[in-house]
């Protein structure tokens, strides 16, 4: 954590300013320390401030003992209502981002992901991304995972990029981008963001909000942090056709309770099917389609037809076997992975008072929204 993060960070519950005590530093970077306000304390460990409350808060007894804080920290943080589904979801992502630290940093990944972001923002190519980010003086990123996009944004955004992840993914993000001069990586819940409202020029939550207990609530919590006139991009899962929902529910019921390693293994058959269908490189033409299952008439790539309408059997040659398998694992393992309709999302935006927005189906599995908060 950098010392100047103190100007941005607040107690996530009361928004009170935080006081910093440094136990170990490396230049401007605080490796171990303590953040306090009147009634709460939060540790900084391995460079990351851990601004968590309630049942997602870690066990910091070793930290307290190491720094002889037992007598001083008599007050325990008050807890928020139980969020045990978030605790379960965090297990998926703490494990995933420990395994896939390099995701998005390799040249092949970047080519694919750059095009992907451009499409989701409604830009004509990845070449427009630097200019897109340069318009923002400050960025709030929710759920950075490996931090590949944190790095890209921090390279182009002139001001601070605050990246918030609730799971131990925050350690992976910090390991990858913590040394950049304008990044601030924080372990926190997007429902309790430790920053003032109306602050950021741009906020982004790509594939994150549907992994919280309540997608709408999380979307609103992030929206509050965007300054009037600022922009917010989010991507949430779209409710798919009936056959895909049926398969997904069945597979999730069996795969989600497994420990991550067992689930990775169980996903291998799905990944193999994606790879083999992809190798077929075959298309079929349906004159009628199956409207009841959401399958339109027209030409369909066979792998995509199965992928979008029956089960998520992802395969992309830009990734190795393990990474492809991880993408399928990522769909079936998280405890919370809500799907939404476009009408539902439009309803949220109406409730928030947003009128200036674009919804885009660059990825048919999801709903991509780029909005501007009213001035
Ligand atoms: C599927 S990953 C997406 C990572 C990255 N945005 C990407 O596209 O590669 C979802 C991330 O959201 C984080 N996450 C889930 N619930 C969260 C919450 N309530 N607050 C902050 N982060 C959360 C997870 O820990 C995980 O790192």
Image (cartoon, rainbow, N blue to C red):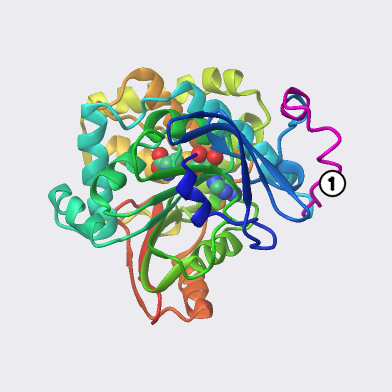
Identify the residue under disc 1: 75
Image location (x, y in percent) of residue 179:
37, 33
Position of residue 213 relative to residue 228, above or below, is: above
Position of residue 117 relative to residue 201, above or below, is: above
Say whether mark 1 is within 8 Å of ligand 1: no
Q: Is residue 298 visible?
A: no
Q: How many marks on residues?
A: 1
Image location (x, y in percent) of residue 80:
77, 54
Image location (x, y in percent) of residue 144:
44, 42
Q: Residue at x 53, y 51 (%)?
A: 6
Viewer-closest of 362 and 127: 127
Viewer-closest of 320 and 153: 153
Q: Residue at x 35, y 52 (%)?
A: 364
Quadrant of the rendered image containing residue 23: top right
Viewer-closest of 271 and 337: 337
Viewer-closest of 240 and 211: 211
Q: Is residue 237 left or right of residue 119?
A: right
Q: Is residue 155 left or right of residue 219?
A: left
Q: Is residue 324 visible?
A: yes
Magenta stretch, residue numbers: 63-80
Q: Is residue 149 left or right of residue 36?
A: left
At mark 1, the secondary structure is: loop
Quadrant of the rendered image containing residue 59: top right
Q: Is residue 74 magenta?
A: yes
């Amino acid at each position: 954590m950098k010392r100047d993060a103190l100007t941005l960070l607040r107690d996530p519950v009361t928004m009170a300013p935080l006081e910093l005590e440094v136990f170990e530093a490396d230049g401007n970077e605080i490796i171990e320390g303590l953040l306090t306000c009147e009634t709460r304390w939060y540790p900084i460990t391995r460079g990351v401030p851990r601004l968590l409350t309630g049942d997602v808060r870690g066990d910091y007894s070793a930290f307290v003992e190491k720094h002889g804080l037992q007598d001083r920290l008599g007050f325990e943080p008050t807890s928020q209502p139980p969020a045990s589904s978030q605790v379960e979801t965090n297990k998926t992502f703490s494990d995933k981002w420990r395994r896939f630290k390099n995701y998005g940093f390799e040249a092949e990944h970047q080519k694919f992901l750059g095009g992907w972001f451009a499409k989701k923002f409604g830009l004509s190519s990845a070449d427009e991304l630097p200019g897109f980010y340069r318009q923002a003086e400050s960025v709030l990123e929710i759920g950075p995972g490996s931090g590949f996009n944190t790095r890209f944004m921090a390279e182009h955004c002139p001001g601070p990029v605050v990246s918030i992840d609730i799971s131990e993914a925050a350690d992976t993000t910090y390991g990858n981008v913590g040394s950049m001069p304008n990044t601030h990586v924080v372990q926190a819940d997007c429902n309790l963001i430790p920053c003032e409202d109306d602050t950021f020029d741009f906020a982004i939550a790509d594939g994150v909000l549907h992994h919280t207990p309540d997608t709408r609530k999380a979307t609103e919590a992030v929206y509050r942090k965007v300054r009037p006139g600022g922009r917010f991009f989010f991507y949430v899962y779209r409710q798919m056709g009936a056959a895909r929902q049926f398969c997904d529910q069945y597979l999730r019921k069996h795969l989600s309770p497994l420990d991550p390693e067992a689930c990775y293994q169980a996903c291998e058959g799905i990944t193999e099917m994606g790879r083999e269908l992809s190798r077929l490189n075959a298309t079929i033409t349906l004159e009628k389609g199956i409207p009841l299952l959401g399958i339109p008439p027209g030409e369909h790539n066979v792998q995509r037809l199965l992928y979008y309408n029956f089960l998520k059997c992802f395969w992309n040659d830009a990734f190795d076997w393990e990474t492809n398998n991880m993408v399928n694992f990522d769909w079936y393992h998280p405890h919370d992975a809500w799907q939404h309709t476009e009408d539902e999302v439009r309803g949220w935006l109406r409730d928030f008072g947003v009128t200036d927005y674009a919804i885009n189906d660059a990825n048919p599995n999801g709903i991509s929204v780029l909005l501007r908060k009213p001035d």
